[in-house]
Amino acid sequence: MLNHILKQTIHALQVEAVSLALVDPHTQELVFQAVSGLEKYNLVGRRIAPGKGVTGWVIKNRQGAFITDTQSDPRFDPKVDQITGFNTRSLLCAPIQARGEVLGIIEALNPQGGSIDPGDLPVLTGIGNLAGTAIRHAQLYENLEAAHLRYRQLFESSIDPILITNWEGQILEANHQAEAITASNLVDLLKTNISQLGIVDEAETGGGYSQLEGQRTISYETTMLTPGGREIPIQLYGREVFIEGVSHLLWILRDITERKQLDNLRDDLISMIYHDLRSPLANVISSLDVLNTLFPENVGETQTKLLDIAIRSTRRIERLTSSLLDLRRLEAGQAIINRQPTPVALLSRNAIENVLPNISSKKQEINISIPALLPEVWIDEDMIRRVITNLLENAVKFSPADSLISIGASQENNSILIWVQDKGPGIPQSERGHIFDKYTRLHGSGTTKGYGLGLAFCKLAIEAHGGRIWVEEGVETGACFKFTLPVWKSSCEDTNRKSSPRKT
């Protein structure tokens, strides 16, 4: 294109030579890009410092210049001819502009008639303006091509399978990883609708993929069945994207086989640890209880404290192992079978007794706000006591010394609302949706890190009882964990009473 511009210039102005140079946007130097009539002087690629010579004057003033005698014009820099070996007698120079920006210059050297015609300057200026528009379009086209190339490289080099579909789900593009995971070639995939892969859950995506409108991102786990019959666990991500201004759907199919295998190994390990620990732990607990009854009344205070610590610690280990086993059972969908009507005040008092030594050691206080006439709840008492104990232990751990921890309850229709309020640093809004996930860790200065198994157990236990659990900002400071449990008389029928008789 540049060479074509120069040929048209030589033809229009009848000059000996023409050169075109563009501004380097990084250094502001002029770089010669194309020449005609100057090929033997190796001018292409040479640079001129900003503001030097006639070209510098033209760029600075944004207007053309004509010089009938270069030897007498102070704007002309003779060093250019000394470097190239070309003899410049007269010249025309015009800026190349596009949308008010100077992109470079175009020069016409040594008219063939012998003298320069000032009337040729408007012609060269017009050529410069037309060249500026053409050059800007060419640059934009090159940038677009480069962007397409980068997109293609990123698309193909992604370690995750990627599919591009229209809003009807028809696959329009797929990378190599998508071909590999679906065990299909690109030609076959382009004939396929993403719904045929068995990974689209309309409950997650919405009808007509409505949940992805407005460039919202969805993510859920699913299983893909390959043509060979292999089941692959997938974490599917979906999002609206615009390609050349047209709305499409981007799907990322992340293979989570290894993660699932690790989860299963972790769960198996937890189950194994529990079953291997249960018998020796029961022996330790019973032995400590017997030892406690055998202690004489006049035994020293130190021995008593040591025995109390041992008993409390083993009881805590017992609660933890029981919660781990319940976690696995609840995840498997096993129903709660040991339900009985339980007073909330008694339930809370038993949980508080488990954490009183920790509260005392940090010189904290606990405020109890539970109405005496509150209805009983229909629960597995041991499981929910461990839920409240876990929330109280967290409150003690996160709250500073000499602070107040609160536990309360109230009736809301056919449910009982129970809450535990701490005075800790609180939980950021961005973390509240994840803290009940297994193995989740909270990060941040001044925040104790945890693996999230305790809260994961709490969530599964409460939901298995038909309630729900969540966290809010505490009053003034800290976090307030709240959960609901069903009221005994309003949620249980006589058949339930027979299947799980009330203890007397």
Image (cartoon, rainbow, N blue to C red):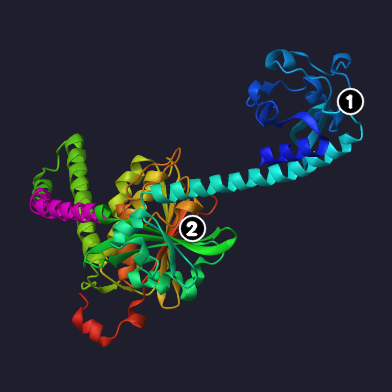
Compared to residue 14, the image places residue 203 above or below, namely below
Compared to residue 361, the image places residue 479 above or below, namely below
Type of residue at label 1?
Ser
Q: What is the crowding at mark 1: few (fewer than 14 residues within 10 Å), some, or many (at least 20)? A: some
What's the residue at 67%, 28% (across, down)? 32
Point out residue 437 in the picture as x, y percentages from the top left corner.
35, 56
Secondary structure beneath dot 2 equals strand
Q: What is the crowding at mark 2: few (fewer than 14 residues within 10 Å), some, or many (at least 20)? A: some
Question: Residues under labels 2 and 1: Cα distance?
Answer: 87 Å
In the image, is residue 266 part of the stretch drawn in magenta? yes
Name the front one of labels 2 and 1.
1
Magenta stretch: dominant SS?
A: helix
The mark nearer the N terminus, 2 or 1, is: 1
Relative to 468, 239 lies left or right: right
Secondary structure beneath dot 1 equals loop
State the residue position of label 2: 472
* 479 and 250: which is toward the camera: 250
Do tag 2 and tag 1 residues touch (Cβ < 8 Å)?
A: no
* 134 and 309: which is toward the camera: 134
Residue 316 visible to an observer of this rendering: yes
Q: Which of the image's four quarters has the N terminus?
A: top right
In the image, is residue 397 part of the stretch drawn in magenta? no
Query: In terms of image quadrants, where is residue 497?
Result: bottom left
Q: Which of the image's four quarters has the C terminus?
A: bottom left
State the residue position of label 1: 115
Type of residue at label 2?
Glu
What's the residue at 36%, 52% (across, down)? 160
Residue 456 visible to an observer of this rendering: no
